[in-house]
Amino acid sequence: MVKVYSTPTCPYCHLAKQFLAENKIEFEDIDVSVNQQAAEEMIQKSQQMGVPVLDIDGTIVIGFDKAKIKQLLKI
Amino acid sequence: MIYDLIILGAGPAGITAAVYAARKRLNFMVVTRDIGGQAAISGDIENYTGYQFITGPDLAKKFADHLKQFSFPLKEGEAVRQVKKLADKAFKVITDQGEYEGKALIVATGKIPRPLRVPGEAKFKNRGVSYCATCDGPLFAGKSVAVIGGGNSALDAALSLAKIAKQVYLVNINPRFTGDPIMEEKLRAADNVVILNGANTLKINGDKFVTGIEVKIGGETKTLPVQGVFVEAGLTPNSAFIEFVDKNKAGEIEVNCATETSEPGVFAAGDVTTVPDKQIIIAAGEGSKAALRAFRYLAELK
């Protein structure tokens, strides 16, 4: 399962989500600007405070790291 | 394998150069860290001809689609480390992942956020230190933050953070702002913004995350208790990897009106150059000029 922790104003979040959509990867989009609990969860999981953070089957990817995302999703 | 042309960067300038190079059937390649450059992280764009309104990511997507209709080696996710001059009118591009040789170069590597270069900045990057208030701001809801800078991007960041954070300190090294007065007025009207002019940021403190910053103001050192530090100290040209072309004091590559640099065979386009205005449409135009000029240079070389 793929989760994207994002904010609506973050251009790299848009790019990341656009990339997943283009590759027909289903994901859950979590808006951490309105969901404080999810924000804390993201900080705890990634040990940092920048968005986007992707949770790809339990592996955490910080930022729109295309190479790593491709590798994890085998695309 | 030696390419006719290597294009460094794929923002509006590099992408446009590549489109022109492809149509000229040059044997070229593109090396870039990302596609779209600063345009991809811009908000709303209302001054790119043909689009009354388009967002940065959407325009970058259109650029990328245009680029990808051509077939050529595109090395994405690579950062250029060094460019060397070889004998017999050729150049070597060394990236973090490989080495490439070309007879001509177009440098279109744009600008990157200027770091503060203070202790703690690198250590706490993304652990409270951010270079994108629009991206990361919402994570600091109800917290205290500092914005470092005094130009429009700093004032803009402080204004948007004032709506989210509990307390905003605006730390400006200069005695007054260089940003627009209308934005300064709005900031002065906000009751949770403290403006510190003439304040030099010395250090960013923290344990796992940022806990505060030290600033020197009027000969006195103060600690501001903040969880977030937004660095908005302007941009710097991404040109350190090439030493043998002339640059101005800011590090911008000197170009003439034909995008030629001081080195024959090396062309430069967009925000990395001395071209006076930094606009998406100007960068794109400069990119096309650079490709056409490189085409002519290569024709004369043969």
Image (cartoon, coloured by chain):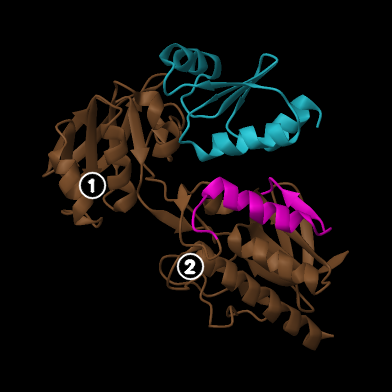
Magenta stretch holds residue B75: yes
Position of residue B157 measured from the top left corner of the image (x, y, whole percent): 33, 41
Q: Quadrant of the C terminus of chain B?
A: bottom right
Residue situated furthest right in the rendering: B1
Asked if one can make out residue B108 in the rendered structure from this viewpoint, the answer is: no
Position of residue B143 measured from the top left corner of the image (x, y, whole percent): 29, 22
Magenta stretch holds residue A28: no
Residue highlighted by disc 2: B252
The count of marks equals: 2
What's the residue at 76%, 33% (across, down)? A23
Asked if one can make out residue B223 in the rendered structure from this viewpoint, the answer is: yes
Amino acid bearing label 1: Asn
Residue extent of the magenta highlight: B51-80
Task: Indicate whether B230 appears above or below B154.
Answer: above
Circle 2: element type: loop
Q: Colour of chain A?
A: cyan
Residue highlighted by disc 1: B172
